[in-house]
Image (spheres, rainbow, N blue to C red):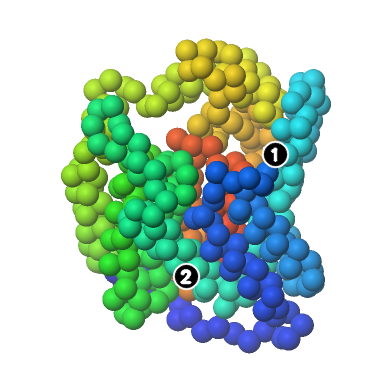
Amino acid sequence: MTVATRPFQPSAPPAASRVHWVIRGAFYVFVLSLPFEYPQRSIPWEVTTITCALFLLAAGFQPWVSFRRFPKPLWGFVAYLYAFLVSFVVNGGLYQDNVLKLFILMVQVLLLLWAGYNVMSDDVVFRMAPVMLAVACVARALIQVLGIATVRTAEWGGGVRVSALGQNANQSAVIMTDGLIALIGLGYAMGGRRWRVLTWPLAGLVGVAVIQNGSRGALIDLVLGVSMFALGGSGLRARLKNAYPVLVVLGLVIWGAYNSEGMRNRFEEAVSTGYLAGREQIYPEGLQMVSERPILGYGPIANQYVLGGRIPQQHYDKRDMHNLYLELLTSTGIVGAVPFMLMLLLGVRNAWRGRRGPAGMMPLALVASGLGANMSGNFLAGPLIWFEFAYAFASDREGPQ
């Protein structure tokens, strides 16, 4: 795959602006923890929430570097947080404990985007960040493929879904998908020939884990993300050359999914019956809720209880929207959703502008996969997508922020 990128030559910034090794280490630990969320824990906070907090604590020891510049797209996130509070108050201040916990997580996300962007402005950290993600996902995939701490869930139509560490199979598949994209990006955008020797077997291992998860949405996200690599290069000839390995990867993934009984049956079920694991009921109700309260929505958390009450046949008092964009519109209305989505669009713009930089098309591939994952899931408080957007913001090495 030929990608027109500038040769990566780490620069030596002035000593006062270098990222301290403690901050780098804390950031790498955070990235390494992303595939190892552990739902069956005895502590109230997720593993990645803790490692992110440790990174932000470390960042505070060198604030003139970690918080040197506030990326302009993040003002959209600030506006969303304001709408979050306004919607909560206007809609009666319901479910205060849950809303407070979610708000704290959202503030952490804002700080992660801010500090992550500045830390990854350092060339060395920018280069190492996807390496850490790839290494972590390979390790997580190896645990699953070897059958260590796995959970196997039988599908009524035949086949099984496999996950590890008690993780939701769909969430596991989303994480593994981004690890696979990082591997491809390292092999064909950043690392050159020496990485390509490792790319294929490691990508195959992670691909097996994705197929074992049995997530239809993650497979579509993988296709969307990997396809972005075909857009690299200058001119039609270069892009056609790039398309060859992309087609090979997609062909192998589709072949593997078809030969997985569980994955094949889930796709056939969706096509023949329209069954989407409850989403076929959730989405119409969500759209109806948007039409009823389009300005400020129903309030954060409260929107999920309203949805649960409208689909009692699913036997949940509270029901997630399973779609980030419906979550935004039903919780904060267009007042919160518009600036939030504008921030996402600016992240995509930065990733596109950074395609000729050291990471090539990898930032765009990662954010495309992340945005796709949020079409069938709601990862509003998930740290992985926000790491990807911080990476996308930092990928535009020469553009204005």
* The label number, if any, that marks residue 343 in the structure image: none
Please say whether residue 389 is visible from this viewpoint. no
Tell me the quarter of the image containing the N terminus: bottom left
As helix, strand or loop, the secondary structure at mark 2 comes to: helix
| Number of other residues with Cα within 10 Å of mark 2, as a class: few under 14, some 14 to 19, many 20 or more | many
Q: Is residue 338 left or right of residue 147?
A: right
> Is residue 317 positioned above or below 354 on the image?
above
Q: CA distance from mark 1 to mark 2?
A: 30 Å
Which percent across, then down, holds residue 250?
A: 26, 53
**N-terminal of the two: label 1 or label 2?**
1
Q: Is residue 312 left or right of residue 70?
A: left
Q: Is residue 347 left or right of residue 57?
A: left
* The label number, if any, that marks residue 131 in the structure image: 2
Q: Nearer the viewer, residue 92 or 46?
A: 46
Q: Which residue appears at 54% of the width and 28% of the height?
A: 321
The residue type indicated by label 1 comes to Leu
As helix, strand or loop, the secondary structure at mark 1 comes to: helix
Q: Which residue appears at 59% of the width and 31% of the height?
A: 327
Q: Which residue appears at 73% of the width and 48% of the height?
A: 107
Residue 185: image quadrant is bottom left
Q: Please give the residue where the numbered disc 1 appears in the rendered image.
A: 102
Q: Which residue appears at 25% of the width and 36% of the height?
A: 159
> Is residue 118 positioned above or below 293 on the image?
below
The residue type indicated by label 2 comes to Val
| Number of other residues with Cα within 10 Å of mark 1, as a class: few under 14, some 14 to 19, many 20 or more | some
Residues at badges 1 and 2 in contact (C-beta under 8 Å)? Answer: no
Which percent across, then down, holds residue 18?
A: 70, 80
> Is residue 125 positioned above or below 272 on the image?
below
Q: Nearer the viewer, residue 160 or 86?
A: 160
Q: Nearer the viewer, residue 118 or 231?
A: 118
Which percent across, then down, holds residue 396?
A: 56, 65
